[in-house]
Amino acid sequence: MKLKQHQKYKDSGIEWIGKIPEDWEILPIKIYLDFLIGSTPLTSREDYFEGNNIWLFITDLNNTDEIYSIKN
């Protein structure tokens, strides 16, 4: 797959990301996602585990606003 090339780039302000397209914004993930804390999804509900659902464990989070990896 060939990705779209952007005209202008800017520094993201995040070292490991580097440059991003000039018209992109970096915003907290909480703006785009709903979080449920303190419950484990029922394994009997197959619909919870289909599609593009991403499950995070509390151990995937660190003391910053960034998620570096998740456990499968």
Image: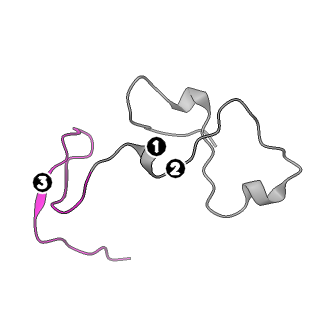
Identify the residue position indicated by label 1 in the image.
30
Type of the residue with mark 3? Lys
Q: Are marks 2 and 3 in contact (CB under 8 Å)?
A: no
Per the image, label 2 sits on a secondary structure element best described as: loop
Q: Are marks 1 and 3 in contact (CB under 8 Å)?
A: no
Sequence-first disc among 1 and 3: 3
Identify the residue position indicated by label 2 in the image.
33
Magenta highlight range: 1-25
Q: Residue furthest right?
A: 44
Q: CA distance from mark 2 to mark 1?
A: 5 Å
Q: Disc 2 vs disc 3: which is toward the camera?
A: 2
Sequence-first disc among 2 and 3: 3
69, 37: nearer the viewer: 37
Q: Quadrant of residue 15?
A: top left
Label 1 Cα crowd, 10 Å radius (few <14 / some 14-19 / many 20+): few
Type of the residue with mark 1? Lys
> What percent of the width, then of the height, locates residue 26?
28, 48
Q: CA distance from mark 2 to mark 3?
A: 25 Å
Q: Which mark is residue 10?
A: 3
